[in-house]
Amino acid sequence: MNIKESFVEATSETTPPPTQKWKFIDKELEKRKSSNQERFLKRIEPIDSLYVRVNGKTLLNFASNDYLALSKHPLLQEYTIRFLKKFGCGATASRLVAGNFTCHEEIEEKLACLKHSETALLFNTGYQANISILPAIAGKETLIFSDRYNHYSLLQGASLSNARVFRYQHNDFDHLKKLLIRSSDYPFHSMRKIIVTESIFSMDGDQSDLYQLKNLADEFDAILFVDEAHATGVFGSNGMGLTVDYPVDLSMGTFGKAAGGFGAYLTCSRKMKQYLINCCGGIIYTTSLPPSVLGSICAALEIIPKMHLERSLLQKRARDLRESLQELGFSTAVSSSHIIPIIMPDEKRALDVSIWLENKGLFVPAIRPPSVPSHQSRLRISLTCALEDSHLSVLIDALRDWKKISGGL
Ligand SMILES: *Cc1c(COP(=O)(O)O)cnc(C)c1O
């Protein structure tokens, strides 16, 4: 008998047990469905800076991170095409091999200048930056102090680093200080410390106190790492984030939000950049950003510093909207920016209101656990400078109607 025949004989004699290997999928999806937490992709067609078509219906967009309405800006499109034609579609290799073009370096120089930092380093995405920088600068001998509301990518980075992670209560610097004091005791006293926070928090739209954080970091000889994903383009001098005015050790941000394109950055010291080029997997083992994307970043960096008027209007409208929502009896939690949550009593209510608004032509997504803590489901409004007072009135009127019909929260 040859090998093939003996294989057929052996397998035909026994009936294989029913397959178990996909059971985890049914189990997880069932769990999410029963707790109103199952998510689905929506098919979106971008129309202009104000409207999107969602599942075939045209809606006023309150869900975009395109805060300065740059994603369709003519200069970004022009530079995107110009860079593509000049340098090609792809970067062809990682930065360390053959993918470090003049345009990568020029953008880093421009960025460092705008951020008032020694130097800058491009990353492919903010997610990739966070999950690869933290493991590069932290290890078993490190203590990471992380704000409880930090973005998932920061948690993931901390966990991949194998550091000991202490999560302090959101923006609670007394709690942070207690944890830092405790860490000065044996056996932690000689370990490296890193404090990690966002500058504008992505789900609550509030701000961290960088002045206090910097003082604490100095007092305890800790590295301060700040995620400026939602501040870049919108806050600080040149619109380049809050760390421009409160320099910190490491500041990262994304070009996928207010900069209207894609990609991410870190600003840091020259020595740190040299260290990361040698030790950060997210730089070493990945193809660098393609020229077209660099074109859009280059254009955005030209425009953003000049957009003072748009930035102040955006925050004025955000203030007005928060006030109107509060007058209607909604909680906007601790928001102090263009990101405005409307806290809902539960997942189902958040979904119901979101669907109700959608039927009125308004796109306001419901955000549910695990993106936010349980019992903190919400509608998340993110304003862009394309939205004018008249558009905000439509939203306020719709929410007022919903309140009347539903009898309140
Ligand atoms: C969006 C976001 C990121 C990820 O940035 P991408 O460039 O979209 O990958 C990281 N941190 C925070 C706080 C974010 O909101």
Image (spheres, grey):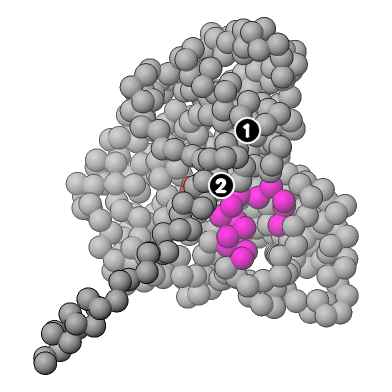
Determine if residue 89 is in view: yes
Q: Which mark is residue 31?
A: 2
Q: What residue appears at the point 56 percent right and 55 percent down from the top-left corner?
A: 153
* Residue bounds of the magenta highlight: 146-159
- For the residue carrying disc 2, how many other residues have a C-alpha within 10 Å: few (<14), some (14-19), or many (20+)? few
Label 2: element kind: helix
Read off the residue under disc 1: 347
Is residue 151 on the magenta stretch? Answer: yes
- The quarter of the rendered structure image containing the C terminus is top right
Q: In the picture shown, does residue 235 fall above or below 384?
A: below
Question: Which dot, 1 or 2, sits closer to the camera?
Answer: 2
- Kindly give the residue lying farthest to the front in the view shown: 13
Q: In the picture shown, does residue 7 fall above or below 97?
A: below
Closer to us: 98 or 5: 5
Q: What residue appears at the point 37 percent right and 69 percent down from the top-left corner?
A: 17
Q: Is residue 69 left or right of residue 185?
A: left
Q: Is residue 319 left or right of residue 26?
A: right
Q: Earlier in the sequence, mark 1 or mark 2?
A: 2
- Label 2, ligand 1: CB separation under 8 Å: no
Confirm or deny contact between disc 1 and disc 2 (CB under 8 A): no
User: Residue 287 location, x and y as percent?
Assistant: 33, 63
User: Residue 34 location, x and y as percent?
Assistant: 57, 40
Q: What residue appears at the point 32 percent right and 71 percent down from the top-left corner?
A: 16
User: Residue 244 location, x and y as percent?
Assistant: 63, 46
Label 1: element kind: helix
Is residue 53 on the magenta stretch? Answer: no
Q: Amino acid at mark 1?
A: Glu
- The quarter of the rendered structure image containing the N terminus is bottom left
Q: In the picture shown, does residue 142 fall above or below 259?
A: below
Closer to us: 174 or 91: 174
Q: Amino acid at mark 2?
A: Lys
Closer to us: 3 or 64: 3
